Structure formats: C-alpha cells, structure tokens
Amino acid sequence: MSASFLIRHACPAGLPWPVVVAWIVALGWLGRVVPAAFGLRRVPNLLLPEYDQVPAGEPTLTVVVPARNEQPNVAACLGSLLAQDYPHCRILAVDDRSTDATGSIMDALAAEHPDRLRVLHITELRPGWLGKTNALALAAAAAETDYLLFTDADVLFRADSVRRSLAYAVATGADHLVTLPTTILRRWDEGMVLGLFQTFSLWGARPWKIADPRARMDSIGIGSFNLLRRAAYLQIGGLEPQRLDVLEDITLGRRVKRAGLRQRIAFGRGLANVHWASGAFGLVEVMTKNIFSAFRFHISLALGACIWLLLFFVAPLPALCFAAVRVPAGIAVACTVWGYMLLRPTSGIPARNGLLAPVAGLLFTYTLLRSMVTTLRQGGVVWRGTFYPLAELRKHSTPLL
C-alpha cells in the first residue's frame, strides 16, 4: 500500500495544509518504525554464544589506526588492541604528522610489542589527499594480511571484539563488515543528541537491509569499525577514488555495496566503544567540521534536510497542543519514542530521550546550518589542522546516488 494512497484516504479533500502535512509526517514515521520493529531482529548480535568462536581458517588481519595529535587517547586504544585474544591480529599505527607525543607513544608501545605492533610515521601529506584517507591508504598498502580493519585512535575494544567480528565475517563470506560501535555517554545531553543521530538509521541506511544486494541504497560505513577483506579493498580500487572525501567511512561503505560486494552489519554492545565529544555543544563542534560534506556541499540538499528535521523531529511534540493535528502528531511522537526503544538494546540510550527529539532536532538543524555557513565563508574545510579548498572537495566528491 503506497504512502500516497494512505494520505489520500487519511486526508480528505478540503483539509487545511497543516493537517495534510501532519498526516504525511505521521504516516512517514509509521512507514519507518513498523518495518524496523521486525527488521532489526534480523541483525545479528555478536554477543550471542554462537559467535564466540575462532574464525574458520584463522585468517590474518591488520588493524589500521590512523592518529593525528591523539596523545590523550592513543595509548588506551592501542592497549585494547594489543589485548585482543585473536593471535593472528597485527596492528599498524599511523602517526599522521602529529605535533604532540602521539608518535613517541606509538613507538614506545611498538618497542614493547615488536611482534604485534608496527608504526608508520607520515611527515608530509601527499597533494590531493585528505589526511585520514592518505594515512589509511598508505597503511593498507603496507599490509599483506587477509583482512584489514580500519578504526580510529579514540576507540576502545573489548578483548574478543576482533575474534567475534572476524568469525562472523568469515562465516558469512562478508567482504565488508561494520560492527556497530557503542557510544560512551558521560552526560545526559550527549544521549539527547546521539539518540537523534542514531535514529537517522531508520530513515537512511536501514540496518536490516544492509546484507540485501538488491537494496543498493542501503549501505553502511563507520570509521570506528570498517572490516574489509583485503581482496575486496583492492577490487574497488582502494581509497584512491575518494582521496578527498571528508566522510571517507560512509563513502567506502557505499562503494563496497555498489560494487556488488557482500556487506554485513552486526550489533555487539561493548565490543567497540567510543566517546564522541563532551556534551551536546562538544558534539556540535565536532559535527560542524564535517556534516555539510554529507550533502556533498550542496546548499539545496542541506536546506532540505533542515526542513525535514523541523517537520519530523521538532514539530510533532508541540503540535500536540493543537486539536486539528493532535492525532497525527501523537502518532509521530509515539513512533519517535518507539524508534528509540527499538535501538536502545544496542545504543544504550534511554527511550525517554525520544521526548527530547525536538530540542535535539533544533540543535542538529543549527549544527547543519552552522557547518554550511562556516564552510562557505572560509571557502573550504579545516580538518585536523589542514585546510582543504571547497572547489577541490566538490570536484572530487563521490555522487550521493
């Protein structure tokens, strides 16, 4: 049954446009949350006993950890990787032009664990490359293992995370696996913003459709845990085609899926853990740097996203005050909270944060507008201390579709 059919029958001719819009929003939410209630059950949970095994054939794996000025985090990250219980796991840490003690911390750990940890020092950025993609590409070229795991220097891994993830990837023949990271929440407002951010998965890349080769628009890539078969990485041409892509993780996942390779996603709360930023405004600061790039620097797409945020996340709760739209608004609010409930077992974010969606939606809208204005005003993006001109970023952006 199409959405247009439902709207025509739910909204008789002659109704005011706010009522029609309210029903569109309500039916849109229903069309996303109801399938999610059934679909999310099909996403494997790597914490279950059947995934507590050694990967078949015991393939080799290199974990690539790029870092630029990550002195506060890198020792803990590398320590958690050195504690992995899978014996065929090697670590390649990349010191990407750091000006703090990141490189020396890496070297000290490598001296203690020469059989498991290597360090690659980058002193100059290759022209035409973003810093992180350059670091990942150089590290991947230096690795000769069966699998590559791209991660970030602020991620903490449980001791069995690599083994469980690799066992599932091998068992399913996956070319690319994302084990969803668990967000570490230190303040209530972090949960407010990240809860909204994670609910976007119900509207964008639906997790239960990732493994479906026919659902080409549903792809996944997360910088905290991108596990790739090395042969698949080489098949898509590595990172060269996206060398100036700010959101390299998302683009990598999209390229894998559209190449017809086997992509998988898995839950595993606590296997890979990351704290994004301190507080809601810390998250705003982090996302300001890169969120405009998610729309390939198109102003019209970014403004359209702002309107969507206001309609679907901000408007429903206050709309309950108006009798004419109370029913559709109530449906939208209930579906928002339901979405949070569905994601809570993996995110750990309480469902009550769904009632804070209007505040989070306003904050996210502000962040997107701030990112757009900042990028346009400075004529590019400042990322990890390096300026990248907007014209160059647009020229090398991979298409959204």
Image (spheres, helix red, strand yellow):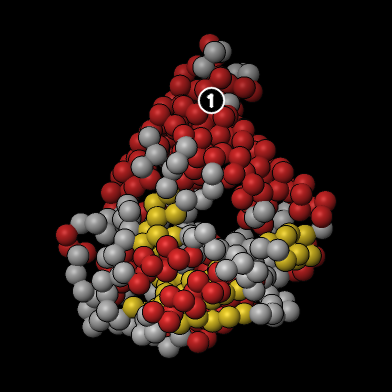
> What residue would you read off at disc 1?
316
- Residue 289: % across, % down: 67, 53
Near-viewer residue (148 or 157)? 157
- Residue at the location (45% across, 66% down)? 75
Disc 1 secondary structure class? helix
The quadrant the N terminus occupies is top left
Which residue is situated farthest in the left direction here?
49
309 relative position to 34: left or right: right
- Residue 291: % across, % down: 64, 52
Which residue is situated farthest in the top direction here?
323
- Residue at the location (60% across, 18% down)? 15
Identify whether 78 is placed above or below 371. below
Amino acid type at image mark 1: Pro
116 relative position to 108: left or right: left
Near-viewer residue (22 or 136)? 136
Identify whether 349 is placed above or below 252. above
Identify whether 303 is placed above or below 394. above
The quadrant the C terminus occupies is bottom right
- Residue 311: % across, % down: 59, 32
- Residue at the location (19% across, 65% down)? 52
352 relative position to 389: left or right: left
